[in-house]
Image (cartoon, grey):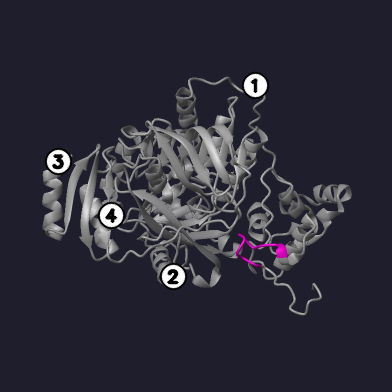
Amino acid sequence: MNIKSINKKLRKEFGDRVNASFENGCIVLRGKLPTWEETVRAGQLAATPYSTTHVVNDIDCAEVQDEKMHLPLLNDTALEGRRVQVLIVGGGITGASLARELMRYKLDVLLVDKEGDLALGASGRNDGEVHPGIDLKKGSLKHKYIRRANHMYEDICRELDVPFIRTGQYACFTDKRLLPFVRLYVQYRKHIDGIEDSCVVTAKELRRTEENINPDIAFAISNPSSGCVSPYNLTIAYGENAVQNGAAVCLNTVVLGMTVKDGRIVSVETNRGTVYPEIVVNAAGVYADKLAQMANDRFFSIHPRRGTNSILDRKAGKKWHGIASVVGLSTGSKSHTKGGGILHTVHDNLLVGPDAVETWERENTATSRESIERVFNKQKITMPSLTERDIITYFTGIRAATYEEDFIIEPGRNTKNIYHIAGIQSPGLTTAPAVAQDVAQEIVKMLGGAEENPDFDPVRKAPPVLREMSDEERSELIRKNPDYGVIVCRCEEVSKGEIIDALRSPICVPTVDGVKKRVRPGMGRCQGGFCSPLVTKIIADYLGIPVSDVRKSNEASVMVYESDRGDGK
């Protein structure tokens, strides 16, 4: 790190509008720029990939407006005076997997999230790929964890009863002239960087698996260890197993401030009261730098990055079996994305995407036509028969990128009792099991040790899934409970019994979307057009409340309004 050379690069591109200084172990940028694109560019010029000397970007950007964080409407005193050993802030895959791992010890663990469910941020809005690590370089934390965690997925998903498939991944090339260079690259990655399953396959071999692939594909890099999982189902399963083992999860709970004295967090103020933790874990995703600032421990910046995915009908899923995308010399590191691709999901849909668009908005998950068109134009090179007509829904997630393009997994630098797990973007879903193991051990050390929990049970049993059962198994289940014979969602073959199972889960989220994420009513072709009213009624009956009190996802998302006739209907 050389501040003079950084300022030289900044002056060359921005004149005297931006200046860098070295303060408290990090690079601080100040100045004024008109656009967010330029602001991010300045951060990238100042950063060194994978460096632990992070960029704090304090440039005043004229394009950035005052974006207010979404806050829950709930205000009560449920947590007032609560003392815990570990407070985890963030209910994504990072926070949920760590909560479960910490329950291997006799610890008092509380996980809070400001949303009404787990996995409502990036953890529920990604493609679900379990990456092989073919494009990750040694020296990064991403590379450190990728292979170890990849190998853990069969065991983790078996314990948590979550579907996982090793689909394999193909990085495809159309230019035959690149073959000698790609072979050398694969050998280097395999033998030097430890991506041991990498190999080159011919177009003929590739078409045995993917008959609908572009005939212009000449060869591909194959990584059979790549797979797919439902990211929100895995996050929820982690959270439920943590609760089953004694952890507490409080949703609709936002951190509003902290009291820090003598380099330690004394208390954490929330909308539900003040909590007194021994250790705080920062797993706050796109708000991780804001939480670090509350703790007087800000040494990095998050610059959000938007990515859009489309979900295609199951009939499209029959045309593709694994994960693939065409790559070339013009794609790769500059795009700061795995390049997206076509992925056959664990639910037999196709997923297409994502793209990568820098944004200053941390919570704007609106989807644009331009993003969908950009993704499809790219992926039609891989699969020419791909068509937007098969889209049944789409979604956009916001990734929490650092300027160094690597994870931050370390204790506080100024504040002694905080641990940061920040900058967790792709492949954060893949690496989560291994990261949780290591961080749990670090937390125990920070606490001065902890007794192992002899009653820890790693097994979480998911509710029965009727559509996957034989006729005999269905009949037996219906005989025991007739609710399983009442089909509510015809597209996904979801019964009333499964919906009630979701409402009885260890982390009950009695909203239409909460039930949808757990047992899939509304995930099919009609996207809830037929079953949403039925699901709403089942929730209302189960809770003993009017249907007008049932919400889609949060307190503000009304499903049914009361009659203005005053008759209660």
Inter-mark Cα distance, 1 to 2? 51 Å
Left or right: 350 in relation to 25: right
Query: Mark 2 or mark 1, which is nearer the start of the sequence?
Result: 2
Bin the neighbour count of mark 3 within 10 Å (Cα to Cα): few under 14, some 14-19, many 20 and up.
Answer: few
Specify the amino acid type for callout 4: Lys
Query: Mark 2 or mark 4, which is nearer the start of the sequence?
Result: 4
Along the line of sight, the residue nearer the viewer: 216 or 76 = 76
Q: Are marks 1 and 3 in contact (CB under 8 Å)?
A: no
Q: Are marks 4 and 2 in contact (CB under 8 Å)?
A: no
- Report x, y in % for residue 253: 56, 48
Inter-mark Cα distance, 4 to 2? 22 Å
Residue 224 in the image: above or below residue 303: above
Main secondary structure along the magenta-highlighted residues: loop
- Residue 454's mark? 1
Query: Disc 3 designates what residue?
Result: 2
Left or right: 26 in relation to 15: right
Query: Mark 3 or mark 4, which is nearer the start of the sequence?
Result: 3
Of tags 1 and 2, which is closer to the observer? 1
Query: Mark 3 or mark 1, which is nearer the start of the sequence?
Result: 3
